[in-house]
Image (cartoon, rainbow, N blue to C red):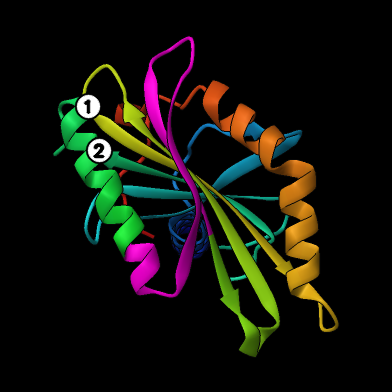
Amino acid sequence: MYKRRQGALALICCGAAITVCALADRPPKAPAIYFLSRTYHLASFNQKDKPMWEFVSGDETVDAWTTRLTIIDRPDARSGTEIARAEAGIKSDYEAHGGKILMAKTLNSSNAEYSYTVVGTDDPAKQRYEISFVKAGMSQRNGYVAIYDVRISDPTDYVGKAKLFLHQHSAEVGNALGQMNLPDISRLPRTEF
């Protein structure tokens, strides 16, 4: 009888260890973000430079996506001037990596003033074009950056499709970003995975 209990206890402990290992591979719980008729779930968090969360929809991943939402916390930016400086750095980073600034302006929403930038990055080797819609503004505590990325690929005419996307959807994306209510950044998980 004692040996059966030991065996059962070992089996239970082994099962618990497997469950814990499986749960460790899952991303931390974060709120879903509903944006442009899609639900985005947390796919990654890293703190290489600034805390950054990447959200994707459906079965997409941070490596294989067609649309992606990124939120970057900017605790170093405590004023409009500091977030403008941070946003200028973001533009420079895009340009350093082959991006072209297609539009940059300061806008006002019912919430506050923010910087809005659209960047296009041509990747002919992969026959794709990435368009980044970037909003940089101030939350109640500090600065933030919200980026909506769209990846367009087509072996015959990816540039033409990207231009068509911009023509048909840039106003819609800009309005959605302007009205977007970010999740409370202080409550987002800060465990790297």
Q: Are marks 2 and 1 in contact (CB under 8 Å)?
A: yes
- Which of 10 and 135 lies nearest the eye of the viewer? 135
Identify the residue under disc 2.
Answer: 84
Residue drawn where x is 45% and y is 26% of the image: 183
- Which of 82 and 30 lies nearest the eye of the viewer? 82
Q: Which mark is residue 80?
A: 1
Quick one: which residue is furthest to the top in this view? 110
Is 17 left, or right, of 161 in this rendering?
Answer: left
Find numbered disc 1 in the image and state the secondary structure of the residue it sits on: helix
Percent coordinates x, y for residue 27 in the rendering? 48, 52
Find numbered disc 2 in the image and state the secondary structure of the residue it sits on: helix
Q: Which residues are magenta?
A: 93-119
Percent coordinates x, y for residue 182 in the rendering? 46, 27
Residue drawn where x is 23% and y is 45% of the image: 86
Give the position of the C terminus as an image quadrant.
Answer: bottom left
**In magenta segment, residue 116:** yes
**In magenta segment, residue 52:** no
